[in-house]
Amino acid sequence: MIEPAQLWASTDERPGQEIVFIGVRLDPDGPRRILDPALLTDDELASGPAAWVRFDDPLPAWEPVHRH
């Protein structure tokens, strides 16, 4: 399962990117299996942001949606 640890709106830190896996007996290949479907192919990347918004999102929705 993937879920946010904390929403940026609730911190005094500047937004950025970080990915952390915490747990007991974690499956070392699990994150790759979950995250790889979210990667763009070269053709998808070349199609640009206007096309990306039409793609299915394989990751779970997070509520509430936060904005920077």
Image (cartoon, rainbow, N blue to C red):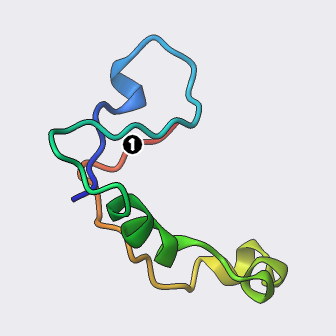
Displayed quadrant of residue 20: top left
Dot 1 falls on a residue whose secondary structure is loop
Q: Position of residue 37 (x, y in %)?
A: 48, 78
Residue at left offset 37%, top offset 68%: 34
Q: How many marks?
A: 1
Q: Position of residue 35 (x, y in %)?
A: 45, 66
Residue at left offset 23%, top offset 52%: 63
Instruction: Establish if 41 lies above or below 62.
Output: below
Picture quarter with the N terminus = bottom left
Q: Position of residue 46 (x, y in %)?
A: 84, 81
Residue at left offset 30%, top offset 30%: 6
Residue placed under numbered mark 1 in the picture: 66
Displayed quadrant of residue 53: bottom right
Instruction: Establish if 3 lies above or below 36.
Output: above
The extreme left residue here reads: 24
Which residue occupies the foreground of this view, 35 or 44?
35
Residue at left offset 73%, top offset 72%: 49
Residue 32 as seen in the image, left or right of residue 60: right
For mark 1, does the 10 Å Cα neighbourhood hold few (<14), some (14 to 19), or many (20 or more) residues? Answer: few
Q: Position of residue 33 (x, y in %)?
A: 39, 72
The extreme right residue here reads: 46
Instruction: Establish if 20 lies above or below 54.
Output: above
Which residue occupies the foreground of this view, 34 or 17?
34
Q: Residue type at mark 1: give it.
A: His
